[in-house]
Image (spheres, rainbow, N blue to C red):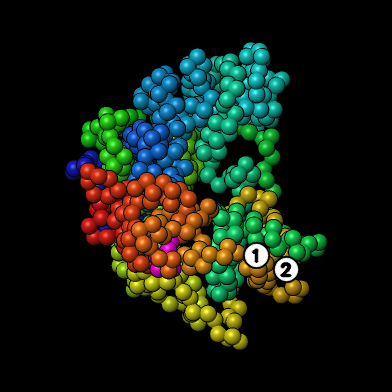
Amino acid sequence: MNGALFNAPTAGRPFEIVPPELLARPERDELRRLDRAEAALVVDGYLRRLSSQEARCRRVLGTLASDFLRRRAHHTLGFVRVDDYARERLGLSGRELQSAACVIDGLRGLPALAAAFDEGTLSWTQARLLIAIARPETEAAWLAIARDRTVRALETVLRDARRRGQVDDPVAALVPGSALSLTEVAPSVAVAAPPQAIVPPLPPDAGLAVDTALDECAESGRTMDGEAAVTFRLRCPRWVPPLWRDAVELARRVAGESLAPWRAAEAIAAEGLSARTHHATSTLDADLPRPPSPRIAANPDETRAAFTARSAFDTIDWSCVVEAVPQDVDRLADDVAACDPHALDRRMRAAVHALHRVDWQLGRLLRLILDCRLYVLFGFASWSTYVRERLGISTRTAGLLVAIERKTWASPALMEAYRSGTLSTVRALTIAPVVGDRDRDAWIERASEVTLRRLADEVAWALDVRDAAPSPIAVAPPTHGVPLVVSPRQMRAPLDEELTAEIIVRGPATVVALLRAAIAAFHPPLTPAWTGLVDLLAHVKGEWQRLPRHRDPVFARDGWRCSVPACNSRRNLQDHHIIFRSRGGTNARTNRLTLCAGHHLHGIHDGWVRARGKAPAGIWWELGVRGDGPPLLRLVGEQYDDCSGSK
């Protein structure tokens, strides 16, 4: 059984620096009587210490991840894709793991920036931005530019350097009043600007790295795929969301990859508009937000004094905070080159456990700062600005921590499983929609018994069963290994038209506009708006199901994706014989599996993955096979075996 996801060597409570009474759930009356100024100072102090610990833990993780990714050790452990490994074993996204490794790789060649980061002069966000553009000969100049500037001012400087590209005369690249500057400066509070520093020219190979860094460090939710992010919401009856989820899954099968929801929505809208053209203006288009002007940016000379001038306090303490982490966590980054992939896996899980113990405290206090709007007292216009400028952590990370804090608030059992590390953030968020009063213990137990892929499938099945019922019901987890089938709605059964559900898609503004136009094109006159979506989904499903399919029935049986547990590959599928035909294996379907090319050619045939038994549900899997010890994982189908090496 997967059990507790993290097995850390740390003992005692070295990470619990916040007093328990401050982490306790406040009552409403207590919040009304709150001394906001005093509470803001206390909570802010602990948040700064926690963010320092978080950065140190993330540096340890990045050191391990850098070596892990350089060796492509996930292949040895039985995983084809980094994202699949990171989500299953660490509870992180592959992008987050790669970003941590990228920062550490950059700091290795930039000793001045590395020293500033260790001293607390640079935050993790600033370091992530600077490693994209700094080089050994220019790191001192970039460090001078970043010192005392706000994160958004540093972003403006980087954008200007990116837009100018190659500059022959660095003196002409002075940011204040530069004739080459393409960014209009938004008005700000009049404060003393830092000394003007010459911005070094953009290195020839830094363009893509700068764009990636700016995207990763952007204020959460403001941009997506280089555009303004917009949220699409549509109220509808409870039986409509299952249709939407079914169409999204079909879009992923057609595309041959695990599309993000907004990319699936783009494919659905494009397919619909290819058949019908939207001419009339619909009410769905009325409230579409316009993207902000790309020419408005922060003052490139803005300093932290700008926030002090707007704050409710005479001064704000901006001194460096360096909070130590236990020595056994620091030692995880020692002698990394001598570790084999299995040892790296154990160390990374221990580092993630340490990070998790910091993050749950961060989430609790960040929610208090957000709900009580205490960030305003420090002169910050928004919570995301406070997180980036004051704490130096990613707003995506902070938003995720607050989201899981809100989800677990109503379920003490889920909160305890998350706090203790039994469930990762990803798994806790996955089961949150179906955890109720009656079946919460069963779902929490199930979340630690199966792969994340199977868990997501079971949650989607439970939501479909719940939404198909005449009234909302609690749905228990299905039996292990059974096919997830929802009983079809009876023909001529009355359709409930009460708007009790909502479909939410967040994506780039152009994608949301495309989806609105497609729904409007299928929207019959004088009918509710959601009927246009139902007709659109019916059309798209019919068109895609008529497409020619691969004639191999094994692909259809296995859901048009790789059968290896935790693998989300949908491309380059191949038909694998469990018992090789050269060894007498038959061509029966019980002896055949769908595998991606990576797992087939390199996992199975190179010996990193083993499979035996009868398809589709009776397969015993071993991932990360090695000759001198147990495999990394043992599973029956997608259920962890009790003797699995993941315990």
In front: 27, or 94? Answer: 94
Q: Secondary structure at mark 1?
A: loop
Q: Is residue 14 left or right of residue 341?
A: left
**Does residue 294 sit above or below 6 in this rendering?**
above
| Residue 167 coordinates in the image, percent (x, y) | 66, 18
Residue range of the region highlighted in magenta in the rendering: 589-593
Q: Quadrant of residue 616?
A: bottom left
Q: Mark 2 or mark 1, which has the lower sequence index?
A: 2
Q: Secondary structure at mark 2?
A: loop
Q: Quadrant of residue 489?
A: bottom right
Check disc 1: other Cα within 10 Å, few if <14, some if 14-19, many if 20+.
few
Q: Quadrant of residue 11?
A: top left
Membership of 592 in magenta stretch: yes
Q: Residue at x 52, y 39 (%)?
A: 216
Q: Which residue is mark 1?
A: 547
| Residue 610 coordinates in the image, percent (x, y) | 33, 54
Q: Residue at x 22, y 57 (%)?
A: 643
Q: Is residue 38 left or right of residue 166?
A: left
Residue 282 appears in the picture as rendered? no
Residue 172 appears in the picture as rendered? yes
Q: How many marks?
A: 2
Check disc 2: other Cα within 10 Å, few if <14, some if 14-19, many if 20+.
many
| Residue 539 coordinates in the image, percent (x, y) | 68, 69
Task: Say the numbered circle drawn on residue 522.
Answer: 2
